[in-house]
Amino acid sequence: MGMSVTISPATDRDAEQILKLQYLCYQREAELYGDYSIEPLTQTLDDLRAELGKGCVLVARLGEEVVGSVRGSVDDTGTAAIEKLIVHPRMQRHGLGGRLLAAIEDRLAAERDAKRYRLFTGHRSDGNLRLYRKYGYAQVGTEEVSRRLSLVTMEKAAYAASA
């Protein structure tokens, strides 16, 4: 490829690329659970732009192309919600997901005083579960959403970031 991937805050100009990448990345999840009505596939560009305005959104770029993204926010208790960690399929299994995860954790701790991180994924999303465990997350709960889908909630303390 010849270029290195950089991670930086997303801008409004990135919204369309993020939304297209999100749609591409969540196809596999939708297929895995037999549900193409999941929120990442139905989110509108306006909704995404609103998220860009209130939360912390990072993008991974290869040149001008957005090849990954992650979002996070911190509530009043210091719990950071990390959401929609996506990496272009051709860029997966090269450490980019872990780099994005570490970058959002660092930013949420430094800029928004995160005390702990929380995320969730589907119970059959083995790659996601493996990645999160590798970065120090432990399962703290499971919620059955439907007959086909249970969401696994995972957490770790902020001091364990960048492990």
Image: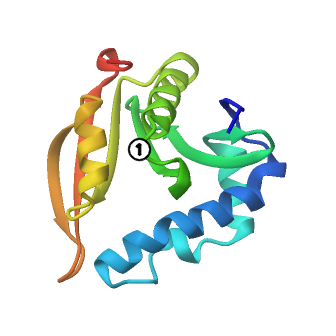
Work out whether residue 76 or residue 114 is closer to the camera in this orientation and state it: 114
Which quarter of the rendered picture does the N terminus lie within?
top right
Query: Could you say where residue 22 lies in the image, as x and y percent from the top left?
Result: 58, 62
| Residue at 71% across, 33% down | 2
- Callout 1 amino acid: Arg
| 51 over 147 or under it: above or below | above
Q: Which residue has dot 1 on it?
A: 93
Q: Is residue 48 left or right of residue 32?
A: right
Task: Point out the residue furthest to the right here.
Answer: 13
Residue shown at 75%/56% (left/top)? 15
Look at the picture and state if 90 lies above or below 134. Answer: below
Using a 10 Å C-alpha cutoff, classify the residue at mark 1 as few (fewer than 14 neighbours), some (14 to 19) or many (20 or more): few
Q: How is the image coloured?
A: rainbow
How far across and how far down the image is residue 58, in percent?
Answer: 63, 38
Label 1 SS: loop
| 121 shown above or below 159 | below
